[in-house]
Image: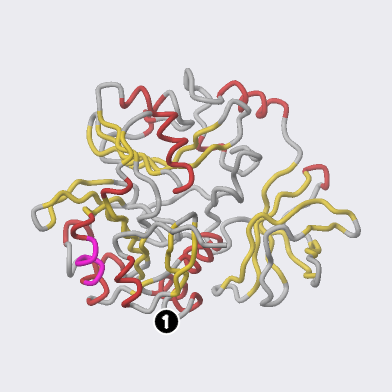
Amino acid sequence: MEQTDLKITQLHEVHKQLNAKLVNFGGYEMPLSYGTGTIQEHMACRTGAVMFDVSHLGTVHKTNSTAYDDIQNTFTNDLNKIHPGKCQYTHLLNDEGNVVDDVILWWLNEENFYVMPNASNTENVLNAVGGVDITADRSVIALQGPNSRNLLSKVLVEASQVPFNEVKSLNYAGNEIVVAGTGYTGEDGVEIHVPNSLAQELFLMLNDVGFIPAGLGARDTLRLEAGLPLYGHEISLARNSIQANLSWVIAFNKDKFIGKEAIMRIKDEGFKQKLYGLIGQGRKPLRERDQVFLNDRNIGEVVSGNYSPVLNSGIATAYIDIDSDINFGDSLTVRSRSTEIICTVARLPFVKHNRRQKKESLI
């Protein structure tokens, strides 16, 4: 069967020049890793500075007189908690109270918002809140790690000074770029929204000053260590925000948002499973869909699993039956078809966030 053509980002040729291993991810041909490999890229982010091409993620531009009200009445979080120039993590729910997508709002100024959904959910978010899909018109480069601001200052001084969870519009080479103090690794850094015409030039300049290119493999292990949810895993159309330990993104006192009645009912009536962290004994990775056992009773399932380079062990998030009455520090068994791994129930995040401002964690 002939393979369907994959979408590519503006940085595709640069990735090939930098010896990226390219894979199909959500319909895009994206870097899984570069010559150094996932573990090395992961540790470079924890100790130095890396750069990711995240242009496959969506951007919905919302800028009109009703933008504030439309966003406030669509998503779960409360814009009254922030102000223009700030960012906010929030959820879009369905009428059953489960998660359609998790997004980051970049509130640039007054009536000007960038809504940043997951790639596969851009259309759903666009249909819910309105606006214009500008995903194809821009590239997004994420710069992460404790040395990221220092290196970025050699290229874009103002961009390196954008604080955590703030967003600013800046000028670069006569063009507007948008810089937000956001990321998906638990490390300090920024994400830069740049016109396609400047993307390759900027990516190579960042490479020249010392940023290590990193792929989707490291992005996933980094976010898992940091206890950050991935849509389709910790949250999905089958899961709600509360059982994922993300009730802090729901403004229950708001007049309305999509799915409010359902999530209020879930809050009152409860649910059968809750998200926990698991740390395995040994280096063997835990994997999605592995089954969790307490003695010989099946009490849950792994939703994200991998190897943690920092902890040098397998780690996972798993939904576990509430009536199993487990506690942090308890030992459980995770079984796949071929392995059995003893695990300890752990708080999230597995690795402490290293940001310039405290960020809420899953548990």
x, y percent for residue 95: 59, 25
- Quadrant of residue 318 in the image? bottom right
Q: Amino acid at mark 1?
A: Gly
| In this view, 129 is above or below 223 | above
Q: Is residue 356 left or right of residue 283?
A: left
Task: Please name the residue that numbered disc 1 is placed on.
Answer: 35
x, y percent for residue 228: 52, 54
Please, what is the dominant secondary structure of the magenta stretch? helix
Of residues 347 and 303, the one nearer the viewer is: 303
Of residues 126 and 167, the one nearer the viewer is: 126
Q: Residue at x 57, y 49 (%)?
A: 362
Q: Is residue 90 left or right of residue 131?
A: right
Element assignment for label 1 = loop
Residue 31 covered by magenta stretch: no
x, y percent for residue 224: 55, 60
Q: Residue furthest front?
A: 1
Q: Is residue 361 left or right of residue 70?
A: right
Q: Residue at x 79, y 63 (%)?
A: 331
- The magenta stretch spans which residues? 199-204
Q: Residue at x 71, y 69 (%)?
A: 280
